[in-house]
Image: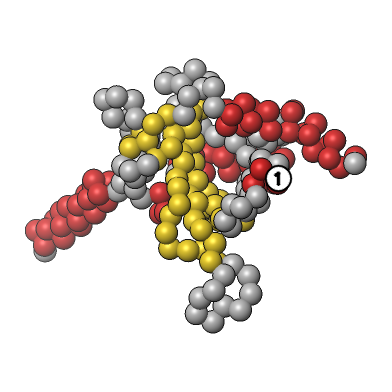
């Protein structure tokens, strides 16, 4: 009888370790990875991450300069570890990765009679990475052309100064993430520059 019990317990322990270590071995990493020439490897499984928001025809450029551009959706995803930390603290931890995915807007298709939906073709992808030991300003932007690796935008690019001046939390546009903005407010992590900006808008 004791031998049978030992066999059952041993089998259960072996099964537990097989499942636990098997899952860890196959789970894709969500930490940033780089090539030998400092390009960022594209996080291929980003659509399994946490979805934050979608925007439609959003632009930080004056409307006159956007004339003739086609309609676009953008979707934002963040790696699960960073999302969990933000929910707990109201700010982003080191190794955060935010993926911006742009898709063309479609109006005619199937039974749709009004409004727009997202097309199947991805028009572009960018990744905003927080890697404190690697980048002078802690964060960097990467653009992807071939879908495999991305080159870092030069520090002179407008995206850095724009995010530094207008971002709600830690140089990221949390003001456009409806589930995270209330968390940042409750944790008191909103940037002072953003609060002044919002105050100026509400007074108009």
| For residue 171, side relative to residue 6 (left or right) | right
Mark 1 — residue?
Answer: 64
Taking depth in this image into account, of 82 and 148 the one nearest to the observer is 148
Q: Please tell me which residue is depicted at 61% across the width and 79% down the height of the picture.
A: 113
Q: Position of residue 154 (x, y in %)?
A: 48, 24
Snapshot quadrant of residue 39 = top left
Q: Position of residue 38 (x, y in %)?
A: 33, 25
Taking depth in this image into account, of 118 and 30 the one nearest to the observer is 118
Q: Position of residue 81 (x, y in %)?
A: 45, 41
Position of the N terminus by quadrant? bottom left
| For residue 145, side relative to residue 60 (left or right) | left
Q: Position of residue 18 (x, y in %)?
A: 19, 52
Position of the C terminus by quadrant? top right
**Numbered disc total:** 1
| For residue 102, side relative to residue 190 (left or right) | left
Q: From this viewpoint, is residue 155 visible?
A: yes
**SS at badge 1:** helix
Q: Please tell me which residue is depicted at 46% across the width and 41% down the height of the picture.
A: 126
Q: Please tell me which residue is depicted at 54% across the width and 74% down the height of the picture.
A: 108
User: Which residue ends up furthest to the front in the rendered image?
Assistant: 68
Q: From this viewpoint, is residue 179 visible?
A: no
Q: Please tell me which residue is depicted at 51% across the width and 63% down the height of the picture.
A: 118
Crowding around mark 1 (Cα neighbors within 10 Å: few <14, some 14 to 19, many 20+) is few
User: Which residue ends up furthest to the bottom in the rendered image?
Assistant: 111
Taking depth in this image into account, of 119 and 171 the one nearest to the observer is 119
């Amino acid at each position: 009888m004791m031998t049978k019990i030992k066999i059952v317990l041993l089998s259960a322990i072996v099964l537990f370790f097989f499942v636990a270590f098997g899952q860890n071995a196959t789970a894709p990493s969500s930490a940033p990875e780089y090539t030998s020439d400092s390009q960022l490897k594209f996080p291929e499984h980003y659509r399994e991450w946490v979805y934050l928001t979608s925007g439609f025809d959003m632009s930080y450029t004056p409307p006159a300069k956007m004339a003739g551009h086609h309609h676009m959706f953008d979707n934002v995803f963040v790696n699960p570890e960073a999302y969990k930390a933000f929910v707990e603290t109201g700010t982003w931890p080191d190794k955060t990765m935010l993926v911006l995915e742009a898709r063309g807007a479609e109006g005619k298709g199937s039974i749709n009679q009004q409004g727009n939906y997202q097309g199947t073709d991805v028009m572009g992808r960018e990744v905003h990475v927080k890697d404190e030991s690697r980048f002078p300003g802690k964060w960097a932007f990467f653009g992807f052309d071939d879908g495999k690796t991305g080159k870092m935008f030069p520090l002179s690019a407008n995206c850095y100064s724009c995010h530094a001046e207008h971002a709600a939390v830690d140089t990221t546009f949390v003001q456009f993430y409806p589930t995270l903005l209330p968390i940042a407010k409750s944790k008191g992590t909103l940037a002072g520059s953003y609060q002044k900006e919002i105050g100026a808008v509400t007074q108009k």
